[in-house]
């Protein structure tokens, strides 16, 4: 007891602590016959969490769920569906779309895409487009709202 507080212990843990040496300092006590009611010292052994999990699987106490029993079964999309979902999130369809990067080589929805086409670092592309110093050379940035308004007017 610590400072008058009650502390509960499981019987198998008390038996193992008293009668089994824990030379490898393992944190848990395993029942060799998988019967939790059998707390005899010869049925107990010190084990790691990994050893406990392996023992549970090998004796059938725990099973690895496969197929329809697995919680992730049926949650994967086909490659066609993944491609369709990805294409829906390009340009103005992307939830984080903020505007168009206009460069001498074209108009791009993302700084990385524009940087690849112009063979420069994306940070440099953002500075060129947003600072407005290079507008005469064909670098500009068009806010998403402006792009939307221009598309409606056209």
Image: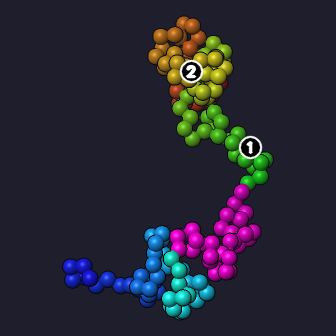
Label 2: which secondary element: loop
Circles 2 and 1: CB distance less than 8 Å? no
Task: State which region is magenta.
Answer: 47-76
Residue 55 part of the magenta-drawn span: yes
| Residue at the spot of label 2 | 121
User: Vertically, is 126 above or below 148?
Assistant: above
Quadrant in the rendering for residue 99: top right
Q: Is residue 97 above or below residue 41?
A: above
Alpha-carbon span between mark 2 and mark 1: 27 Å
Q: Residue at x 51, y 77 (%)?
A: 46
**For the residue labelled by badge 1, is the local secondary structure a helix, a strand or a loop?**
helix
Q: Residue at x 32, y 83 (%)?
A: 7
The residue sitting at 65% across, 36% down in the picture is 90
Residue marked by disc 1? 83
Q: Position of residue 36 (x, y in %)?
A: 54, 88
Nearest the eye: 100 or 83: 83
What's the residue at 62%, 77% (across, down)? 56
């Amino acid at each position: 007891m610590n400072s008058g507080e009650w502390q509960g212990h499981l019987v198998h843990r008390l038996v193992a602590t008293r009668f089994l040496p824990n030379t490898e300092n393992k944190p848990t006590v395993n029942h060799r016959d998988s019967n939790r009611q059998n707390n005899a010292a010869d049925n107990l052994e010190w084990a790691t969490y990994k050893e406990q999990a392996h023992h549970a699987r090998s004796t059938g106490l725990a099973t690895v769920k496969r197929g329809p029993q697995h919680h992730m079964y049926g949650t994967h999309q086909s490659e066609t569906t993944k491609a369709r979902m990805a294409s829906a999130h390009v340009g103005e369809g992307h939830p984080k779309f903020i505007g168009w990067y206009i460069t001498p080589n074209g108009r791009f929805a993302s700084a990385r895409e524009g940087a690849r086409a112009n063979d420069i670092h994306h940070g440099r592309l953002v500075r060129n487009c947003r600072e407005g110093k290079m507008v005469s050379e064909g670098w500009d940035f068009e806010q998403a709202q402006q792009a939307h308004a221009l598309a409606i007017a056209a």
